[in-house]
């Protein structure tokens, strides 16, 4: 797959997750960052090491009086991934929040996985009620220009 195809797939995954909480009131607009990233190329310059991946990040701040908690919002999103066959890692939890992490083997290269992390804050209102989403594609050295 090309990096452009990974970008499109990342956006599709994000849309499927965000639709689960589209009816939940927000404190502010969602903050989205989506970008092409180069793999760690410590011993190579980028021309010799063109591997790159797509990373999509979203920050959602629920309204303090929202009908669900950030953890419940994360649970809704996690249910979508589980229904689609994503493989759950051990959840991370503390008294201030938690994170669900999932992998999905890429059909092109089994050793490369898609990754989704869904984080949530556990704070009493009126503190921000945050949910974060990170989507990372497998690496590729292909662009649309290579097709």
Image (spheres, rainbow, N blue to C red):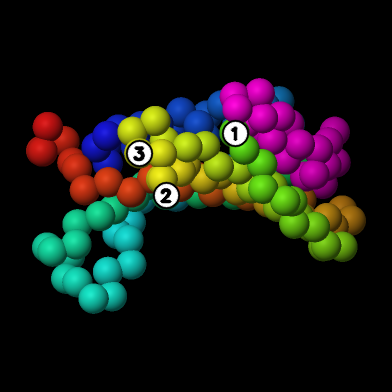
Q: Say whether disc 3 or disc 1 marks the residue closer to the N-terminus.
A: 1
Say which element carries label 2. Answer: strand
Residue 130 visible from this viewpoint = no
Q: Say whether disc 3 or disc 2 marks the residue closer to the N-terminus.
A: 2
Residue 109 - label: 3
Q: Position of residue 116 (x, y in %)?
A: 56, 44
| Tag 2 residue | 55
Instruction: Residue at 55% x, 42% y: name it.
Output: 103
Q: CA distance from mark 3 to mark 2?
A: 18 Å
Q: Say whether disc 1 or disc 2 marks the residue closer to the N-terminus.
A: 2
| Tag 1 residue | 86
Say which element carries label 3. Answer: loop
Instruction: Residue at 75% x, 57% y: name it.
Output: 92
The image quadrant of residue 146 is top left
Q: Position of residue 64 (x, y in %)?
A: 82, 46
Is 31 inside the magenta-drawn segment?
Answer: no
Magenta stretch: dominant secondary structure = helix
Image quadrant for the C terminus? Answer: top left
Write the start and end of the magenta stretch as one range. Answer: 64-85
Mark 3 Cα within 10 Å, few/some/many (few <14, many 20+)?
few
């Amino acid at each position: 797959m090309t990096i452009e195809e990974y970008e499109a797939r990342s956006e599709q995954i994000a849309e499927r997750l965000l639709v689960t909480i589209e009816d939940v009131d927000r404190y502010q607009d969602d903050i989205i960052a989506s970008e092409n990233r180069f793999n760690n190329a410590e011993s190579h310059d980028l021309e010799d090491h063109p591997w790159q991946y797509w990373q999509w990040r979203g920050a959602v701040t629920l309204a303090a009086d929202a009908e669900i908690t950030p953890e419940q919002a994360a649970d809704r999103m996690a249910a979508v991934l589980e229904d689609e066959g994503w493989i759950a890692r051990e959840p991370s939890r503390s008294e201030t929040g938690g994170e669900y992490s999932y992998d999905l083997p890429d059909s092109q290269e089994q050793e490369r996985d898609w990754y989704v992390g869904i984080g949530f804050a556990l704070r009493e209102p009126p503190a921000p009620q945050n949910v974060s989403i990170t989507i990372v594609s497998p690496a590729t050295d292909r662009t649309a220009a290579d097709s």
